[in-house]
Image (cartoon, rainbow, N blue to C red):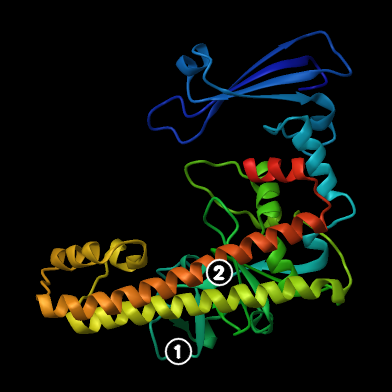
Amino acid sequence: MFDNFTLEKILHLNPVFKDASVSSCIYVGKKTLQEKYNITYYKTCDIDNFLSSIFELKIIPIEYILKNQNLKILFIDEKEAILIDKIFLNSNLLGNLTYSWRGEEIGTKSTVIVNKNAKFRIIIGGNIERFYFKGEELFIEESNVKKELSNYQKDKIVIRQLGDNINANYDNNGFINVQAVYNIFSINETIENKFILILINSKLIDFIYRTLYKEKISFPRILLENIRELPIKEIPKEVQQPFIEKADKMLDLNKHLKEKKNKFLNRVKDNFEIEKVSKRLETFYEYDFKTFVAELKKQKIKLSLVQQDEWEEYFNTYKNEINQLQDEINTTDKEIDKMVYELYGLSEEEIRIVEGA
């Protein structure tokens, strides 16, 4: 396209038709070729919004598109392009430092996945969050594992395929997993898995992924080939140690948070014989005791005044403990982001670009 004419403007519209899941673009250009020029890139919901001057706008120098291997036109301005170049400078690609593969070629409803009485624990995509596993425990027999078992049994990073953002956790239990999960472990003797985990769960790497690779709006999906392109700083093992300590802390805090939540919910389910926990009951620590009582009423469970006195104290104890853990997780997350910004040499202005993206 760029060999035949000068591209002047792009108008990027969200899905034009009601049932469409893809967006549309209008390109404006001229036949005269220019070596250096800027492209004006508009992004908006529809033509009416554009005519009403409701849109996002970026000015993109053509040289930033031409140096992209796939000639991909990114919705970034010159400052963002310079920042991305800086992040990749003196970094290695994740794919050069690690071995990675997709899990077993089976879906979550496969008949080889069972609830109990099988040799190996198996993880599905929905089990994976940042720094912890959630959901029910599932299992699989060794005879149904078709990919290299020894790779699964290594300490590794696991990433959920579905979602807007990278969600990665650390697996040192040798869990098997399904095709909606990506597995990564370091093949570089100087780079630790937990150091990589901290980087790919950071705000900075999330910025890189969303800016360069995130494409689909309706069905967001993380692609393994894009994960392999993420920029990783190679630093000595002793310099990685503070990052590894933060990884251990995040894994420990999230484990304790999960245990607290599960203990409270199990007590509720056992005492009131609740089979299905509602969303509000599951996130009880975000609400007050009055909401908790109201949620029980929806399940046709009415607490007497004496029961309410007993449960209110129990509820508030767990709520406070969980929120304290969550506050500590949030604080540690910010500390990690600060460490990663320093590692990649970002200025205050560049940090604002990352956090405002």
**Residue 113 image offset from top left, x and y in percent:** 43, 78
In the rendered image, the quadrant that contains the N terminus is top right
In the rendered image, the quadrant that contains the C terminus is top right
Q: Is residue 240 left or right of residue 337?
A: right
Name the residue beneath numbered marker 1: 118
- Marks 1 and 2, Cα distance to the nearest angstrom? 37 Å
Name the residue beneath numbered marker 2: 328
| Label 1 Cα crowd, 10 Å radius (few <14 / some 14-19 / many 20+) | some
Q: Is residue 115 left or right of residue 149?
A: left
Q: Quadrant of residue 186?
A: bottom right
Residue at 47% x, 75% y: name it. Answer: 257
User: What amino acid is labelled 2 in the image?
Assistant: Glu
Secondary structure beneath label 1: loop
130 or 252: which is nearer to us? Answer: 252
Of the two numbered discs 1 and 2 in the rendering, the one whose residue sits closer to the viewer: 2
Residue at 55% x, 51% y: name it. Answer: 221
Q: Taking 12 as reference, is 281 above or below it?
A: below
**Residue 161 image offset from top left, x and y in percent:** 56, 59
Marked residue nearer the N-terminal end (1 or 2): 1
